[in-house]
Amino acid sequence: MSTHWNTENIPSQAGKTILITGANSGLGLGSAKELARKGAKVIMTARNQTKGQQALNEVKREIPNADLELMNLDLADIPNIRKFVAEFKNKFKKLDVLMNNAGVMMPPKRQETKQGFELQFGTNHLGHFFLTNELLPILEQTPNSRIVITTSQAADLKEADIYYDDLQWKNSYKKSASYGQSKLANMMFGLELQKRLEEKGSSTIAVLAHPGYTKTNLQDEMGLQGVILNFLVAQKLEMGILPQLRAATDLDVKGGEFYGPGGWRNLRGYPVLDKIYEKALDEKNNKKLWQLSEELIQGI
């Protein structure tokens, strides 16, 4: 495996259909550009259609022959996700890669999704959990399809845990612990999903990735601390998108693997195979979270 894996290592994506959540900015937009450059049909989703259109226009300016489609998707609204999936299945008969990239990071005050879930857990985990399960039939009828789940090193922080006693942070809200919970949930979901796909002999795989510390608009909520860290530590977006692009396209990738930067403290550098965080290795806990997630969205 290449130690300096970069966009030149991406094989042709011609004939592939790739769906990216949160493609209107940051990692999602950067990934959309590179995959379009390699010939994929890229479905860019955004909650805000104006921002989504601006992003699509930006890709078109850089890559005039890009094959793009913009679709409305609000991961903080379960009925909206259901509507999106119906529209997607109407338009497309295959899906080679689902890139679960969108995320909400550390709003200073507790916010809720349309259905009353805490915003970070509801969007980052539950929204993607529901979307993925709804799209599984089309993914599984596409040979060797992939589900790429973007998590974060926040999943490995001391305070990152699944707070079953107060999952929605109604008693007390701590933005960093809540973010850590949502990103740990991403990782646990990805591993449990891979286990379930393997058990039924599916050719679809679930792969995990994290961008290390990459300068994106997500750090806006971190105030001065974010500005300083962006200046001292952050790597450029061009590097930050590489782990999820490798997870999506490298032919040597296997289900259940985890890719992240290989440099200093895995915060920056070229993408390498990373170690699954210990908190996500408990299969019973992963299964418990899956079942609870199903119960939470049931009947919505």
Image (cartoon, rainbow, N blue to C red):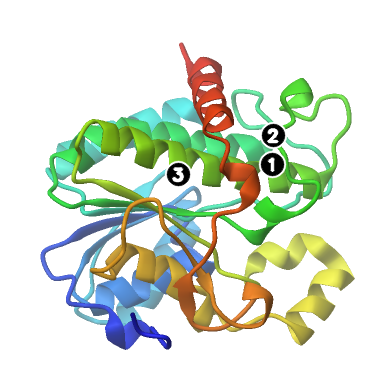
Which residue is at a point 42% across and 86% down the rendered structure image? 3
The residue pinned by badge 1 equals 181
Residue 103 in sight from this viewpoint: yes
Residue 76 in sight from this viewpoint: no
Mark 1 neighbour class, 10 Å CA radius: few under 14, some 14 to 19, many 20 or more = many
- Per the image, label 1 sits on a secondary structure element best described as helix
Residue 58 at what x, y percent from top left?
40, 76
The residue pinned by badge 3 equals 190
Q: Give the Cα distance between marks 3 and 1.
A: 14 Å
Q: Amino acid at mark 3?
A: Gly
**Residue 113: quarter of image:** top right
Q: Are marks 3 and 1 in contact (CB under 8 Å)?
A: no
Relative vertical location of residue 259 with respect to residue 156 in this rendering, above or below: below
Seen from the viewer's position, the closer of residues 150 and 58 is 150
- Per the image, label 3 sits on a secondary structure element best described as helix
The residue pinned by badge 2 equals 162
Which residue is at a point 73% across and 82% down the rendered structure image? 233
Left or right of 262? Residue 147 is left
Q: Give the Cα distance between marks 2 and 1.
A: 5 Å
Which residue is at a point 53% across and 40% down the rendered structure image? 188
Looking at this rendering, what residue extends furthest in the top direction?
Answer: 299
Q: Give the Cα distance between marks 3 and 2.
A: 15 Å
**Residue 203: quarter of image:** top left
Mark 3 neighbour class, 10 Å CA radius: few under 14, some 14 to 19, many 20 or more = many
